[in-house]
Image (spheres, helix red, strand yellow):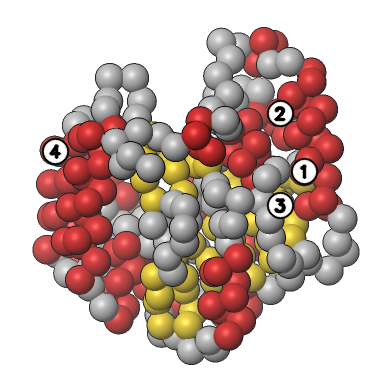
Amino acid sequence: MSIFRVPQWVTQHLHEFPTYNAIPDSLFQQLHKDLARYQASETPLVSIVIPAYNEEKDMLKTLSSLAHNKSLYPTELIVVNNNSKDHTQEILDRCGVCSVLETKQGISYARQAGLEAARGKYILSADSDSIYPPEWGIAYIQTLEQNPDVAVVYGQYSFIPSEGATRLGLQLHELVAENFFRTRTGKLEAVNVMGFNFAYRREQALQIGGFKHDLDRAKTGRAEDGWMAYELADLGRIQLVKMSNRVWTSDRRLMEAGSLIKAFMLRVKKYVAGGTPHQGVVS
């Protein structure tokens, strides 16, 4: 596979519609059928938790990929609607997805609501603008099952180019990040944990109090996902788990910085800061 293009297994999930009303009923019907298994178990071992705020443009892509997931474990899917003003909730309802409404605004509150609503022993943390390979989560759960000294597992990812972006630039960003930032070890490895692609034990997350809500990401660079990983590292190791296929996610996280160069320099700044919550970076 060329590293400079989005693979075919990803593009098959890139549903693009100009409006909500343009989405064909047949797609909703197929997803409703394929996602029904996530409500089949009364005692799931695994909970996939996704926060969502105004995600009508991307939610179908994520659900489409998860409909092809080949989990070996009883799994439930929970999407937390964090006061969406668009058609996010209608999409969830028409796809038959279990949803929770969290009225406190903010991704940390949404993730916390999902954590508390989950019934699984293990939490797979995902996002509503990401596309997941069929085998996603299997190696994560196996690692946690077989290694009680591991508290957090996470994986590799690539970016889907938005209009005006290129895979070449994004790929170079990914290569540099993977070879430069992943020298951290111990608790400081939390700097590499992303909320759309990590897993942990629900009991341990509740033990440390769940997600932190008073982080000012714009000023400090701190985020709820890295903070969770950093705190969980007091209970066990953080471990990178590689899979044959990566998670592919929207490049909007990078574009929010203004450009790839600005996004990279921001992460360098956070990396040099030391990776601890008191120094202002864990994601």
How far across and down, in percent of the image, does residue 276 sit? 25, 71
Q: Are marks 3 and 1 in contact (CB under 8 Å)?
A: yes
In primary-sequence order, the first of circles 2 and 1 is 1
Neighbour tally class for label 1: few under 14, some 14-19, many 20 plus, Cα within 10 Å: many
Q: Which mark is residue 261?
A: 4
Q: Which residue type does callout 3 highlight? A: Leu
Horizontal side, residue 63 vs residue 36: left or right: left
Neighbour tally class for label 4: few under 14, some 14-19, many 20 plus, Cα within 10 Å: some
Q: Which mark is residue 91?
A: 2
In whole angstroms, how far apart are the C-alphas of marks 3 and 2? 14 Å
Residue 68's quadrant in the figure?
Answer: top right
Q: Which mark is residue 77?
A: 3
**Label 3's element?**
strand
Q: Which residue type does callout 1 highlight? A: Leu
In whole angstroms, how far apart are the C-alphas of marks 1 and 4? 39 Å
Looking at the picture, tell me which residue is in the foreground, 277 or 35.
35
Q: Which mark is residue 35?
A: 1
How far across and down, in percent of the image, does residue 18 sit? 56, 10
In whole angstroms, how far apart are the C-alphas of marks 3 and 4? 36 Å
Q: Are marks 3 and 4 in contact (CB under 8 Å)?
A: no
How far across and down, in percent of the image, does residue 265 sit? 12, 46
Residue found 54% across the figure and 28% down from its top: 14
Q: Which residue type does callout 4 highlight? A: Ile
Residue found 54% across the figure and 88% down from its top: 148
In primary-sequence order, the first of circles 2 and 4 is 2
In whole angstroms, how far apart are the C-alphas of marks 2 and 4? 35 Å
In whole angstroms, how far apart are the C-alphas of marks 3 and 1? 9 Å
Horizontal side, residue 139 vs residue 44: left or right: left
The N terminus is located in which quarter?
A: top left
In primary-sequence order, the first of circles 3 and 2 is 3
